[in-house]
Image: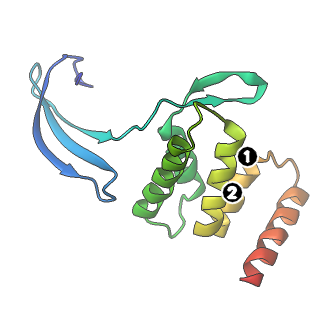
């Protein structure tokens, strides 16, 4: 593992343990070049998945993009990091077990929307405002009223 501080190619694992949500292994490493310590996470990857973006552009699936979007939507909301990790891991597992080598980005966005809808209504609306490209206050009003109707029925 390359050191993030000096770019030396070798590091020694000092400690390994499962992450809090048991979906990855957390490893503490020490660089053999500069002696700096850093943490890495190792996750199971079932298959290589390519995301098909709008305009038919393709790029490798990147879990961190979902993590970043979900974290931003849930910022300053009463949602624990553990719940966010579970949501992202669940979406990643769904994508990898679908059996398709290529997945449309629109499908991933809908999975995130559904997960956030169940997790936190404010985070759901925040994510939807960017994902669905709200341009006016009326877009928020219409979407928020549909969220109230759905949550009012449950």
In what quadrant of the picture does the N terminus appear? top left
> Where does label 2 land, which residue?
126
- Residue at 51% x, 41% y is 96
The outermost residue toward the front is 99
Give the side of residue 74 with respect to residue 86, left or right.
right
Q: Residue furthest bottom?
A: 153
- Specify the label residue 115 is tagged with: none
Label tally:
2
Kindly report the distance in space between the C-alpha atoms of the residues bearing marks 2 and 1.
9 Å
User: At 14% across and 26% down in the image, what residue appears?
Assistant: 11
Badge 2 or badge 1: first in the primary sequence = 2
Give the quadrant of residue 37.
top left
- 148 vs 78, left or right, is right
Q: Which residue, given by chain and number where applicable, does mark 1 sit on?
A: 131
Front in this rendered view, residue 33 or 47: 47
The spot of residue 135 in percent (x, y) is 86, 47
Q: Decide: marks 2, 1 in contact (CB < 8 A)? A: no
Colour scheme: rainbow
Q: Residue 100: image x %, image y %?
A: 59, 35
For residue 135, above or below residue 146: above
At a point 62% along the width and 68% down the height, the residue shown is 118
The quadrant in which residue 20 appears is bottom left
Figure check: 5 above or below 26: above
Is disc 2 placed on a helix, strand or loop? helix
Residue 92 is left or right of residue 102, and the answer is left
Q: Is residue 131 above or below residue 151?
A: above
From the top left corner, tell me how far across and down residue 17 is, in percent. Answer: 18, 51
Q: Choose between 6 and 17: the one closer to the eye.
A: 17
């Amino acid at each position: 593992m390359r050191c993030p501080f000096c770019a030396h190619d070798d590091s020694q694992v000092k400690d390994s343990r499962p992450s809090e949500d048991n979906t990855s292994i957390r490893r503490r490493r020490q660089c053999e070049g500069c002696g700096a310590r850093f943490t890495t996470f190792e996750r199971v990857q079932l298959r290589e998945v390519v995301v098909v973006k709008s305009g038919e552009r393709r790029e490798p699936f990147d879990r961190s993009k979902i993590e970043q979007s979900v974290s931003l939507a849930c910022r300053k909301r009463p949602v624990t990091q553990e719940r966010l990790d579970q949501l992202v891991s669940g979406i990643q597992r769904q994508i990898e077990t679908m059996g398709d080598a290529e997945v449309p980005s629109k499908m991933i966005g809908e999975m995130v929307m559904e997960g956030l809808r169940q997790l936190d209504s404010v985070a759901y609306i925040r994510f939807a405002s960017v994902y669905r490209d709200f341009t006016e206050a009326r877009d928020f009003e219409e979407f928020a009223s549909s969220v109230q109707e759905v949550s009012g029925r449950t």
